[in-house]
Amino acid sequence: MRYFALTPFRFTEELVGLLMTTAFFLALPLATLRAEHVRIVALVTVIPDKYSRIAQKLAGLFGMVFCLWLLILCLPWLEFAIQRNIKTEVGRLLMYPWMALFPLSALLTLVAFAVRSPEQIGSQDLSDQVSS
């Protein structure tokens, strides 16, 4: 629109923010599944392999509990947005389709934590990350 009408849509900034947030929340489960997110491995690399695997399993369990907790907390928030038919301020875009991505992302990230096998998060994976 900037080239054809010499002005952008008035809701461009809102739409860009919503699309960027959508991209982040849809990429989060995949990044978790592939373990391509930021991880702090300083402690796990210095303890014996047996304890390292236990620590990584505990980290996965904490990740699942956190995602479940987020899912439980955000469902009433989404329900409220649907009931009130909440829209953005400038463009009057409906918010609940965008807000529905948050519980979907939490659910898919929970599944990603559950699907990752202990072999995928073994000590070799950690040593590869430390060396790079």
Image: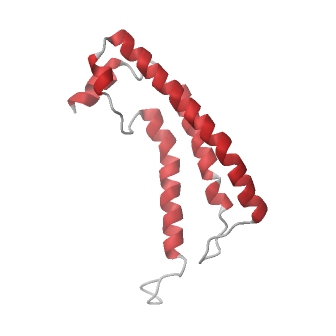
Q: So how many labels did they put on this image?
A: 0
| Residue 7 percent coordinates (x, y) | 46, 87
- Kindly indicate the quadrant of the structure image that contains residue 122: top left
| Residue 68 percent coordinates (x, y) | 62, 35
Residue displayed at 43% across by 15% down: 54
Q: Is residue 36 above or below residue 90?
A: above
In the depicted view, which residue is nearer to us: 80 or 93?
Answer: 80
In which quadrant will I find the C terminus? Answer: top left
User: Farthest residue toward the left?
Assistant: 131
Q: Is residue 90 above or below residue 97?
A: below
Q: Is residue 37 above or below residue 113?
A: below
Residue displayed at 69% across by 53% down: 78
| Residue 128 percent coordinates (x, y) | 27, 26
- Residue 10 seen anywhere in this rendered image of the structure: yes
Residue displayed at 65% across by 47% down: 74
Q: Is residue 46 above or below residue 17?
A: above
User: Farthest residue toward the right?
Assistant: 83
Q: Is residue 126 left or right of residue 20?
A: left
Residue displayed at 64% across by 71% down: 93
Q: How is the image coloured?
A: secondary structure
- Residue 119 seen anywhere in this rendered image of the structure: no
| Residue 88 percent coordinates (x, y) | 62, 71
